[in-house]
Amino acid sequence: MMASQDLLMDNWRLLPDDRRRFIFEQLTRYFLSPLLAVDALVPVSVSYFGQVLQTFDALIGGEWLRFVPGQRHVKLGIETPLPTELAGLAESLGLSSQEMRDQLSAPAVVDLPPMLVARSSVASDEEVIGQINLTTQVFRGNHFAYVPYKPTVLSLIEPRTTSLDPAAQEPWPAVLTAGQVVLRLASSHHYQVALKHRWTKAALVKQLGGFGFALPTARDYEWLLGGGFLQLFAWGNAVPETLPAYLPNRFGLTFPTQRSSAELTQGDEVAAAPYQKGDSLLKLSPFYRAAVAQPFEQQRYRKLVRIELN
């Protein structure tokens, strides 16, 4: 059995490794659809500015999901008026204190549940269903979704040369497509298998819900990107000389700095915004709120499972 307290950050850190693994295995067994097998489970150590989080990843339906412990009474958002430190930072960003405040979420204290979270986001018109091994042609993931598209997938990964010399083998393209099928190279031996859909946000949410998944709320997103730290950016309250390719993250999730798409949240709020070179750095804050949402088809989504124990 697992205790709800063990799923909270402070308790989780104190658990022995075998206990953490047992709990994680139970979570993947009871909080997801039985149609989705756990195809791999690996321990992960995330280092973030001197802090270390021991957690786990699971390969489920072709995507890696990470366990993020919950935490109660988390302070999120930015106070009004701006704290002195942030008022000075606003000037560095070329904004007035009011302009900066208008684009940031209001302060709140929230309880964040434990979650299984996709490590990276997916285009809003795609559904990842599994992975295909290039050597064995064995598929791992949602077999019910895969069967109708199996001939298409196998035709895309036919041997690219008849030579027996491995050195003569043509490299696999990063992306292969045919009809609704999209294959993305996930490793030297695997393609991730996805299906294109012409659907709406409501249809996406319904499809996710059928397997136990959901979209994050705006507050979930703040927690996942910023880790619950009351600082304007994932790296702190400063303007960096250069930007890394990915935002530093307390949970080791993937948030690219250069991105053309926002990430979907449950409501109408846009908790993430596109950021291109030359844009205001404020768009990279966990607390940023875009004034106008991008069209659904231009956004991405990051699915998650909230762990609620009665």
Image (tube, rainbow, N blue to C red):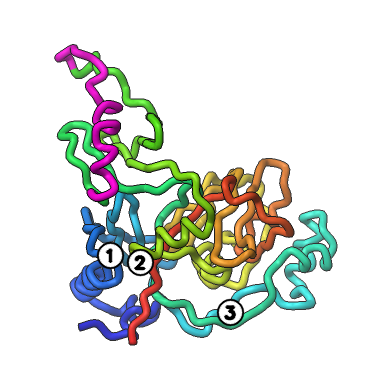
- Residue 180 in magenta stretch: no
Which residue position holds label 3?
75
Structural distance between the alpha carbons of marks 2 and 1: 6 Å
- Find the distance from the CA under tag 3 to the CA under tag 2: 27 Å
What segment is highlighted magenta in the picture?
Answer: 143-165
Q: Main secondary structure of the magenta part?
A: helix
Q: Residue at x 32, y 26 (%)?
A: 172
Q: Around disc 2, counting alpha carbons within 10 Å, would you say few (fewer than 14), some (14 to 19), or many (20 or more)?
A: some
Q: Assign a secondary structure to mark 2.
A: loop
Q: Say if 257 sits above or below 7 in the image.
A: above
Q: Neighbour class for label 1 at 10 Å: few (<14), some, many (≥20)?
A: some
- Residue 58: where, in percent of width, then height? 28, 58
Q: Earlier in the sequence, mark 1 or mark 3?
A: 1
Residue closer to the observer: 254 or 121: 121
Closer to us: 154 or 59: 154
Instruction: Report how many numbered discs are placed on residues in the image.
Output: 3
Whole-angstrom CA distance, mark 1 to mark 3, is 33 Å
Q: Look at label 3 and name its amino acid.
A: Lys
Q: Which residue position is annotated with label 1?
A: 33
Image quadrant of residue 253? bottom left
